[in-house]
Each structure stands twice: as structure tokens, then as C-alpha cells.
Image (cartoon, grey):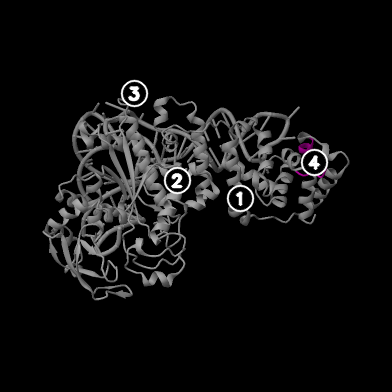
RNA sequence: GGGCCGUUAGCUCAGUUUGGUAGAGCAACGGACUUUUAAUCCGUAGGUCGAAGGUUCGACUCCUUCACGGCUCACCA
């Protein structure tokens, strides 16, 4: 894989890959590079989850392409975090309320199907990621801590707790500094994490003393006093320290994060240095915004979910959208789906004629498994056209739409896979987003009589055998007979019969849906 | 208060790494197909590249300052 080495591919995953190459140094190329991405399992996976794994994967593939080196992607779930508040979109809120402050991995599954709360969420995450064919190793905090994966790092943290406090405390509000500890012991009596306070450190014994008496939301500590080992899951460490611990223990070389985590990443960098480790190559990305430019938040329900997007458009289009410059905040809303899909299809058409060098900088190369699975597409059919067509046909079957398109472009059959998805999604989009906004105009008196003429002509013997051309000229004849500009009658057909400003060529349309259907449309409007 | 991003055509964005008098798509407008209407083709118009200063023979591009819009952080991962 040396062919690409001298070429400066400029798409951002390659820019990132070059950063990693520089970062690991000449000796690093022979070692496996570890990419990481982390998730909080307190909720269901969402678009940010998708974006983070996708982007990390793109950089990973670019790095592999440039170096031929081996890589791994660790997907890490923070299931040892305590439940901080009861999510309002989950069942059994009362049960969850009673478990506030306990590790997510030790709380029953509110859906009742998995072994724990976090088990359910991790299962969903896995399902979600597998849908898109991502390659990753799933790990969880509960396993990692309890298996002792982090023990070496935890020892170092305890031995250097003074230095860590020195770094973290100045970043806290005055009133929170007193008594703050990077360690959260799980109370051996009530199993809560956030109600314990560390009262003493014992680096030689590898333990901490604690008392479980702190208030946490609606709950308060049980009053238990004890000593916990920092090893094997006896304590969990606080967020920024946790991040450093993971980097240290797994030898993470690359991780992406939202820009809200920049300060956290800086602190974690300092902490891992105290531990004697090397911080990974970090990359922050901008947030997703809704149509009003506000940050997308699941709890507020603004913006778009992955599920919604996939209902109306193929997954490739979402990947295509997310691919664009991660350093630029992106507005994400459903109304931009048609444009995004069309742009994606445009790229697909152009991809065929690109040389290898250009292809590597195409978003399609990246989003389709490093160029391994870019579909062929040469038709001019796009999402906008499908939408117009579906709209004109009035919620048709997939078959009917395909038939219509074949008339327009005989090539369509060659790309049936792409086109069929397009049509299916287009129909869903039409039903949910266009149909509710249709406006049927009442016809004028003149138009009424024109429609009557049209209906009469279409009902005449032999009309059902008319060709597209004959049907088309029928409209002209009828209009001219009454001294009406033909274009006005066409406009009336779209606005009165179909409830839209524009539409397909009448002859083709009538031929496909059948003369009888046109008559029905006229009848339906009470003409 | 700290950090960050953005500002280029009506809209959505390329172009900035490696300086050489601005591009695409859509929208608009005009035309062609002896019938403008899912379309296609040809063409036209549209930008003091947020502002000012600096470096340079030359700046959208590099440097400095500022303005505007927005995001984010202070233990919540």
C-alpha cells in the first residue's frame, strides 16, 4: 500500500491520518494503533453516537490506507456511572428513582428483558452499530474495573492523588473544592457511588476511607462508614480522571470528542502525564444544531434522530451529510433531506469517472468502506424527482413509480437497488412531509367547463388506448377550443387535481396511471 | 470571565494547509425541444470573499486588531 504515500490527499480523514503518523513517529507504524470512542449508556444511541463512530472509522481507514498498519477501535461504555436522574422517556420511573446514584450496571432493566439497565442500553448500542456494519470491540466500565484492567492505573492515581487534586481543584467552583476526591467508592452497604465522601487515602494499602452521608438529588447516603480497595471495582474514578485512566490502560492513540469536552481533554492529558503515560492524539468536532441553530438535545427532542432520517432517506445520505467538515457546526433537520440525497447521488454519478487519486478524496470513498462498496449509479433520477412523481401519483406502490421512471430513463433498471430504496423512502417522505401540506385550489368557472370537456374526451370510446402523445395533445385541443392558453389548463390540472404547483407531463402521467384514474381524479374534485 | 467555531453569489457550501486578480449546486432570468410545466440542453445575470491595518511584486489565502453571529466550559458524563 505504498502508492498513496506521496500524494497529499486533502479530505479531512487523510489529514487526520497524517497527524497520527506524525504523532506515533517512525517507530509507531509497526505497532497497532488504538482508536477509542466512548458512550454513556444512560440513554439510547443517537445521531451523535453514529457520527462519532463513523468519523473515527473514517480516520481509521484512512490511516490504514496510508500506512498499511493494523488498527483497533475500542467502543467503551461507561456503565459504571451512577444513575443521576430518572430519564423521562423510560418505563418504571419509580423503580429507577429508588436506584438513583447506583451504577447503571447494577440497576435492573426497566424494560425487563436484559440483565441490567446498562445491559439493555449496551445491547441497543451494539444493535445500532451493527446495523451500519461498523467494526469495533465493545468494552464496558463494569467489566474493565472489576476484571482489574485498570488496576495498574488506579494504583498510580492513588499514589499521585495530591498532584491530581492540584490540577483539578483550581477548575472547580470554590464551594465544591472542599472534600472533592477523584475516587468514588461504591458504598458496600447501599451500593451508591454519589453519596460517598472520601475521608482518607492509603496508597500503601491501596485503599480509601469513606463515609456514605452525602445528599444526592432526592436520595441521601445510608450513613455507612468503610474502607474500599481502589482495585477491582471497589471505586470508580471521576470523569476526567476516568478518561485518562482508560487512555493509559488501553494505550489509546486517537480519540474524537465534541468541543464541549475540550477542557476535559486538556485536564485528562495532564493526568495521564502524571501517570507516566502519553495522551492520545485528540480531535474535537463541532456540534449538530437544529434548524434554529440550537444544539441538538435528545431530552429536548429538537433536531433529527437517526431513525427519522433513515425513514425518509438511505443511510448513505446521512453518512454523506455527517462526512462534511467535522469542524463546522451543522444544522440538521428533515427539510434538508432531499437536497442531501440529491447531492449524494450527484457524487455517485461523478465517482464512476474519477481516477483513483480523486476517488480517495471523495466523500463516497470514505463512507463506503474505503471505496470497497461504492454503488454504481448512472441514472439522472434523483430524490426530488421521485418526490414529485410520488406526489403526482398520489401515494403509489413502488412498482408503479418504478414503471414511470423506466419510461423516463431506461437505465433505471440497472440501478434498481439504489432506485428502489429511493422510491420507498420517497413515499414515506411524501406521506409524512408533503401530503399534509397539499393545497387544492378551487377551479374557476372556465376551468370547470374545461375539466368537463377533458372528462368527456377521456370517457370516449378508444380513449383508454390513446398514446402519451395523443393524450398530451388532447389537453391542447381542449384548451384552444375554448380560447384558453394551454399552459393555463396544465397549471389548473396540477393545482386543482393534484394540489401542487408543478407536476409531470400530462400525457405520460395519464398513460401510466391510466385514463380511468384521471377521470376519477376529476370526479373526486366534484367536477 | 476562559476556550472554540463561523462570516465567500438570493440559499447551501467549495476554495485558505503549499499566496498568483473568485467556483459549484440549487434558485432567478432568457432561449431551444415546430405544445415551458417529473425533465433535458444552451445561455445570462448575480460577490468591495465581515471590517481595518500589516507582510508581499501580488492576499479570499499569511500576521495583527476589531465587529457580528453562534457554540461551549466552571464536576454532568
Chain letter of mark 4 equals: A
Q: Mark 4 points at which residue?
A: A480
- First in sequence: mark 4 or mark 2? 2
Q: Residue A258 carries which label?
A: none
Chain letter of mark 1 equals: A
Which one is in front in this view, the residue at disc 3 or the one at disc 4? Answer: 3
Q: In this view, does A255 lie above or below B72?
A: above
Q: In this view, does B40 lie above or below B27?
A: above
Q: Is mark 4 on a helix, strand or loop?
A: helix
Asked if marks 3 and 1 fall on the same chain, the answer is yes
Which one is in front in this view, the residue at disc 3 or the one at disc 1? Answer: 3
Q: Mark 2 points at which residue?
A: A130
How far across and how far down the image is residue A25, in percent?
21, 34
- The CA distance from mark 2 to mark 3 is 32 Å
How far across and how far down the image is residue A325, in percent?
37, 42
- The magenta stretch is A470-484
> Is A266 part of what is drawn in magenta?
no
Q: Nearer the viewer, residue A379 or A425?
A: A425
Asked if marks 4 and 2 fall on the same chain, the answer is yes
Q: Name the residue under label 3.
A: A3
The image shows a total of numbered marks equal to 4
- The CA distance from mark 3 to mark 1 is 46 Å
Amino acid at each position: 500500500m505504498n502508492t498513496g504515500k506521496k500524494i497529499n490527499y486533502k479530505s479531512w480523514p487523510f489529514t487526520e491520518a497524517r497527524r497520527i503518523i506524525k504523532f506515533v513517529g517512525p517507530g509507531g507504524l509497526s505497532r497497532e494503533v488504538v482508536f477509542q470512542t466512548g458512550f454513556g449508556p444512560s440513554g439510547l444511541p443517537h445521531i451523535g453516537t453514529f457520527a462519532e463512530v463513523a468519523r473515527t472509522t473514517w480516520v481509521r481507514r484512512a490511516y490504514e490506507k496510508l500506512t498499511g498498519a493494523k488498527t483497533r477501535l475500542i467502543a467503551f461504555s461507561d456503565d459504571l456511572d451512577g444513575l443521576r436522574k430518572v430519564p423521562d422517556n423510560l418505563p418504571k420511573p419509580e423503580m429507577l428513582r429508588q436506584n438513583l446514584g447506583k451504577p447503571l450496571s447494577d440497576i435492573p432493566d426497566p424494560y425487563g428483558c436484559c440483565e441490567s439497565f446498562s445491559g439493555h442500553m449496551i445491547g441497543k448500542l451494539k444493535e445500532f452499530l451493527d446495523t451500519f456494519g461498523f467494526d469495533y470491540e465493545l468494552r464496558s466500565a463494569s467489566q474493565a474495573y472489576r476484571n482489574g484492567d485498570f488496576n495498574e492505573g488506579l494504583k498510580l492515581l492513588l499514589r499521585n492523588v495530591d498532584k491530581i487534586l492540584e490540577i483539578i481543584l483550581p477548575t472547580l467552583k470554590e464551594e465544591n473544592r472542599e472534600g472533592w476526591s477523584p475516587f468514588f467508592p461504591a458504598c458496600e452497604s447501599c451500593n451508591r457511588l454519589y453519596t460517598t465522601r472520601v475521608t482518607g487515602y492509603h496508597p500503601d494499602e491501596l485503599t480509601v476511607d469513606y463515609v456514605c452521608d452525602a445528599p444526592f438529588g432526592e436520595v441521601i447516603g445510608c450513613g455507612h462508614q468503610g474502607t474500599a480497595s481502589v482495585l477491582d471495582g471497589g471505586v470508580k474514578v471521576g470523569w476526567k480522571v476516568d478518561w485518562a485512566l482508560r487512555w493509559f490502560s488501553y494505550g489509546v492513540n486517537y480519540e474524537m470528542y465534541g468541543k464541549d469536552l475540550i477542557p476535559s481533554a486538556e485536564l485528562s492529558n495532564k493526568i495521564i502525564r502524571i501517570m507516566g503515560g502519553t495522551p492520545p492524539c485528540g480531535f474535537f468536532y463541532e456540534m449538530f444544531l437544529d434548524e434554529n441553530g440550537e444544539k441538538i438535545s435528545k431530552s429536548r427532542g429538537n433536531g433529527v434522530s437517526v431513525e427519522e432520517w433513515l425513514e425518509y432517506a438511505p443511510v448513505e445520505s446521512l453518512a454523506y451529510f455527517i462526512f462534511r467538515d467535522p469542524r463546522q457546526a451543522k444544522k440538521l433537520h428533515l427539510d434538508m433531506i432531499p437536497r442531501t440525497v440529491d447531492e449524494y447521488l450527484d457524487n455517485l454519478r461523478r465517482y464512476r469517472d474519477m481516477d483513483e487519486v480523486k476517488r480517495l478524496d471523495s466523500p463516497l470513498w470514505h463512507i463506503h468502506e474505503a471505496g470497497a462498496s461504492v454503488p454504481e449509479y448512472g441514472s439522472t433520477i434523483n430524490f426530488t424527482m421521485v418526490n414529485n412523481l410520488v406526489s403526482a401519483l398520489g401515494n403509489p406502490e413502488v412498482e408503479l413509480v418504478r414503471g414511470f421512471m423506466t419510461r423516463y430513463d431506461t437505465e433505471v433498471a440497472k440501478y434498481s437497488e439504489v432506485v428502489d430504496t429511493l422510491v420507498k423512502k420517497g413515499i414515506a417522505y411524501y406521506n409524512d412531509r408533503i401530503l399534509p401540506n397539499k393545497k387544492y385550489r378551487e377551479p374557476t368557472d372556465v376551468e370547470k367547463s374545461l375539466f368537463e370537456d377533458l372528462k368527456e374526451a377521456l370517457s370516449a370510446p378508444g380513449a383508454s388506448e390513446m398514446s402519451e402523445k395523443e393524450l398530451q395533445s388532447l389537453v391542447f385541443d381542449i384548451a384552444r377550443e375554448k380560447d384558453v392558453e394551454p399552459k393555463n389548463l396544465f397549471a389548473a390540472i396540477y393545482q386543482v387535481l393534484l394540489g401542487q404547483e408543478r407536476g409531470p407531463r400530462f400525457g405520460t402521467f395519464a398513460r401510466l396511471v391510466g385514463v380511468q384514474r384521471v377521470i376519477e381524479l376529476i370526479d373526486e374534485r366534484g367536477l
